[in-house]
Amino acid sequence: MKRTEINITGIVQGIGFRPFIYNLARRYSIRGWVLNNEKGVLIDAEGEDGNLDLFLKDISRLAPPLARIETFDVRCLVPLNYTTFEIRKSEEVQDKFVLISPDVATCDQCLTELFSPQNFRYRYPFINCTLCGPRFTIIQDIPYDRHKTTMAPFKMCPVCQKEYEDPSDRRFHAQPNACSACGPSLCLKDRDGKEVFGDPIEKTLDLLAKGEIVAIKGLGGFHLACDAKNQEAVSSLRSRKFREDKPFAVMCRNIEAVKEHCEINKEEEKLLLSVERPIVILRRKEDSSIAHAVAPYQDTLGVMLPYSPLHHLLLDGLIKALVMTSGNVSDEPISYKNEEAFHRLSRIADYFLFHNREIHMRCDDSVTRIIEGKPYILRRSRGYVPFPIKLSFPLEMILACGGELKNTFCLTRGQYAFMSHHIGDLENLETLTSFEEGTEHFKKLFYIEPKAVAYDLHPDYLSTQYALSIQDLPRIGVQHHHAHIVSAMVENGIEGDVIGVALDGTGFGLDGTIWGGEFIKANLKDFDRLAHLKKVPMPGGFMSIKEPWRMAMVYLLDAFGDEAAQLRIDLIRRIDFQKWDILKRAIEKKINTPWTSSMGRLFDAASSLLSIRDEVHYEGQAAIELEMIADYGVKEEYPFHIHGDEKPMVINPAEMIRGMVHNLIDGAPSSKISGKFHRTIARIIIETCEAIRCKESLNRVVLSGGVFQNIHLLSLVAKGLKRSGFDVYTHHHVPPNDGGISLGQAVIAHMRLFHV
Ligand SMILES: [Zn+2]
Ligand SMILES: [Zn+2]
């Protein structure tokens, strides 16, 4: 007989780990006990040699799906002749820091019960167990216990209570455990607040089938839902939401229903079915019957599978695909409280499907796609947050405030970086309030008292102003593109100098101009700007982002001078020359005309030049539609010039612009020109990296920034760089867009302030 003490750390609490150990111990006739302590789980196990070995092996092999075992220490002890195996009461300790689980999609066992008429939770929309259900969104305080969640007002009935107390039960200590006798319930109301009587799910299904728009309270907030095949319903949702073109997400009943509308490969299927259940961007089939208005001008669809019991019930009727878009008006944060949703969404939704389990933290759906067989995260939120990013070294406690668009913040503690859920575009008071509440909540959950605050250099960002208002802590500004590169470095676990290629729309530069086509020598602490796209004016500032035709004219002016106005291309025929003359004068007189080296603006210009988009309705639209029409078979490239003897080097795309115009005049199709444009940008990146390698002897390239959401470009660049012998690093756990920069800010702040 042997006795061992097992210390396990990682994510091992609140996810059914102790009942799992209990049942495993019984299987192998192990005696002793298990308990939660401040570090994780502690096991004292005694048994026959062979059995004990199997027990140890199976802990890691069969651990619950949510468990993340980080360390597993085993120590031999003198046997004590235990007679039973028991779950002991948790040790009470001062610093109770533990990791907290994200919300988890309904597990298979709960799903089977949900649809079994003989089960007492048959069709109960809030069924859950230790392996699934709400977590992050219902936790008000720690430790994670029912009375500190929004389940507190619901007193468990004797049946639920018995499950909760039985160590061998799947629902042992499942904090949100509930049934129809004791738990939360649904209530359907019309837009006047009058309750609609009858079965709320049946009624909702009838309404959706009739083409009505229903606001549905989910796990992390409200969705606005309608039948995804009903063109009229989708269009009316679009106009009521003041959302002209930005795609809506679709929730499909199951994988078979997804396959009706989209091409999917093995990796995409796996990601759709993962416990995180993110939205996955998929290639839409041409014969798909999903309404065109769901994703206008797109050949993709953002699709997810049901992740709560309520979703499964809603998709179990006639409708196999629902539009499920965030319940908000244009740029506001997603609604998550009943009263507030009713107030804000009553002009959009015809009906409201409420429930009475409160959401404590709002959390939007995550957005992902598969690139080269691996997940690529564009929005990291529900299902992923608050799992931390694990760093290869410990950090001082830091609050990093992130950027403006797609804001997230980041709080660090030891080797963990807790990146927040998607806060949204920090452009209004509602989002700022959500940001402030979020930081306070994370500080409380993870016992973090920041020793410093990091922020973006852009003086106008609300996140920057918030950081600067914190008087009693050291504050440190971090350059936008440096933060991008470092965020990608730390998720890849690399240190030392690298070539950072940071391409995006807007980032405040050290010289006060707007950067965005940047090649930097970077490490975790400092950076040096080695090359950038040639600077051009942005007449009207912000309006140049909204109206890509302005950037097209700027690039034409740069490439052709005053002859631009005589070019025989469609863009010139469309231009209001009165307006353009005013803008030209503004450029000359330097009125409201910032200068930029932004790659995003060059994509905008190309999009308008090809008559794809002169005005955008959401960030990145012009570039997305340019990518969509590109012919991937094109092999040619346009010429360009890299001024290698300047410091930093300057990349001049004027010859490319001239080439594109000549192709247009010759009547070449836009798809060919777009394909050639993409290849040229990839070539520019590769040759610039090669020029830097010659001078700096660096061979590792890190790719980041919103432009790398363009998967066509990303794969051309990554392949080309590898062919040229570079080691290439891209994002997989953190978004390449501004949703990722808070992580980089935190690490850079630590290195500058605390790493001597
Ligand atoms: Zn379950
Ligand atoms: Zn109950």
Image (cartoon, helix red, strand yellow):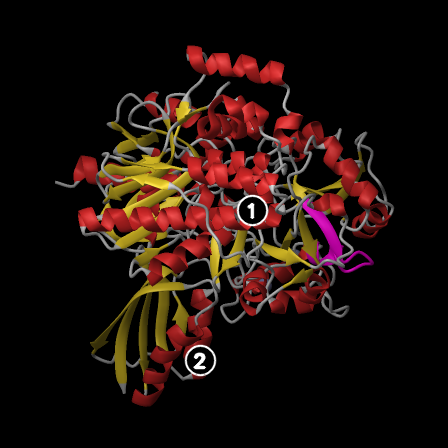
- Dot 2 lies on which element? helix
Q: Position of residue 145 (x, y in %)?
A: 47, 50
Cβ of disc 2 within 8 Å of ligand 1?
no
Q: Which amino acid is tagged 2?
A: Arg
Left or right, residue 728 beside residue 221: left
Whole-number angstrom distance, CA of label 1 to CA of label 2: 67 Å
Residue stretch in magenta: 310-324
Q: Is residue 323 magenta?
A: yes
Viewer-nearest residue: 10 or 668: 668
Viewer-nearest residue: 188 or 388: 388
Viewer-nearest residue: 371 or 675: 675
Q: Which amino acid is tagged 1?
A: Ile
**Sooner in the amino-acid sequence: mark 1 or mark 2:** 2
Q: Could you say which quadrant of the image residue 718 lies in?
A: bottom left
Quadrant of image for the C terminus: top left
Q: Residue at x 74, y 69 (%)?
A: 116
Q: Position of residue 637 (x, y in %)?
A: 46, 50
Q: Is residue 727 magenta?
A: no
Q: Residue at x 33, y 57 (%)?
A: 728
The residue at which mark 2 appears reads as: 26
| Crowd class of label 2 (few under 14; some 14 to 19; many from 20; radius 10 Å) | some
Q: Is residue 735 visible?
A: no
Left or right, residue 357 beside residue 658: right
The residue at which mark 1 appears reads as: 673
- In the rendered view, would you say 461 is above or below 695? above
